[in-house]
Amino acid sequence: MSKNKIIDAAERVFSQKGYYQTTMQDIADEAKVAKGTLYYHFKSKDELFIELLESGTGFITHELQKSFNKQIPLKAQIKEFIKEAISICLKYKTFTDILFNELSSGMEDEVLERVEVLKYKYIGIFKEILDEGYREGCVREINRELAAISLMTTLYHLSDHISEKKCTVEEVETFLIGYISQGILTT
């Protein structure tokens, strides 16, 4: 059994049950392996959880960074980023559920700190775009870190509405682009 298959199984279980209620046995059952096989690859649930978050965050940030095209104006880059971020939230729903929801009192402080670092790595991509926009004069003088947190959290929750068929991708794109244009971008 490969380490990646165990991580995939862990992602499904953590997404369904949450960190605190998930046991190594739950993950072993989902992966269809003996519990000892999990411990061969991971010393603890914490280690498996962090590995899942690090690999997922690395992959997603790489995907988001690929969407940047320095050849087009920054405002257009922001719109493309929004479209790509919505797509990623929908495509990797179980992972983004874990990333945005798993701040559990059942975690060790060290694990919580690492989760926060990984979450901010994800959010930091959008902050970098806003920082660049500010330097170019197309982003207002605002707290760009709070704006990035607000936008990425809003984007994540709106992707839930898309998944639940409460709205369409196009409606969310239009809303977020309007929200950014009116509140963040200069005219």
Image: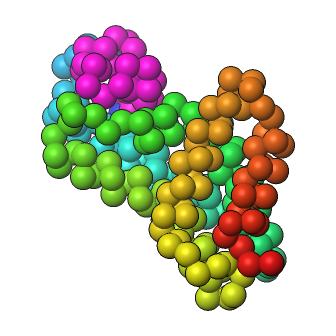
| Residue 182 x/y as whole percent | 75, 65
Q: Quadrant of residue 35?
A: top left
| Residue 30 x/y as whole percent | 39, 14
Q: Residue at position x 66%, y 63% from top?
A: 66
- Residue 22 relative to residue 84: left or right: left
- Residue 160 relative to residue 33: left or right: right
Q: Main secondary structure of the magenta part?
A: helix
Looking at the picture, does residue 163 appear above or below residue 67? above
Looking at the picture, does residue 34 appear above or below residue 45? above
Foreground pick, 123 / 65 = 123
- Residue 171 relative to residue 28: left or right: right
Q: Does the magenta portion include 171?
A: no
| Residue 34 x/y as whole percent | 26, 13
Q: Residue at position x 66%, y 78% from top?
A: 139
Q: Residue at position x 38%, y 49% from top?
A: 54
Q: Can you see residue 70?
A: no
Q: Does the magenta portion include 20?
A: yes
Q: Which residues are magenta?
A: 4-32
Q: Can you see residue 177?
A: yes
Q: Quadrant of residue 128?
A: bottom right
Q: Which quadrant is the C terminus positioned in?
A: bottom right
Q: Residue at position x 80%, y 70% from top?
A: 76
Foreground pick, 35 / 82 = 82
| Residue 95 x/y as whole percent | 49, 37
Q: Quadrant of residue 1?
A: top left
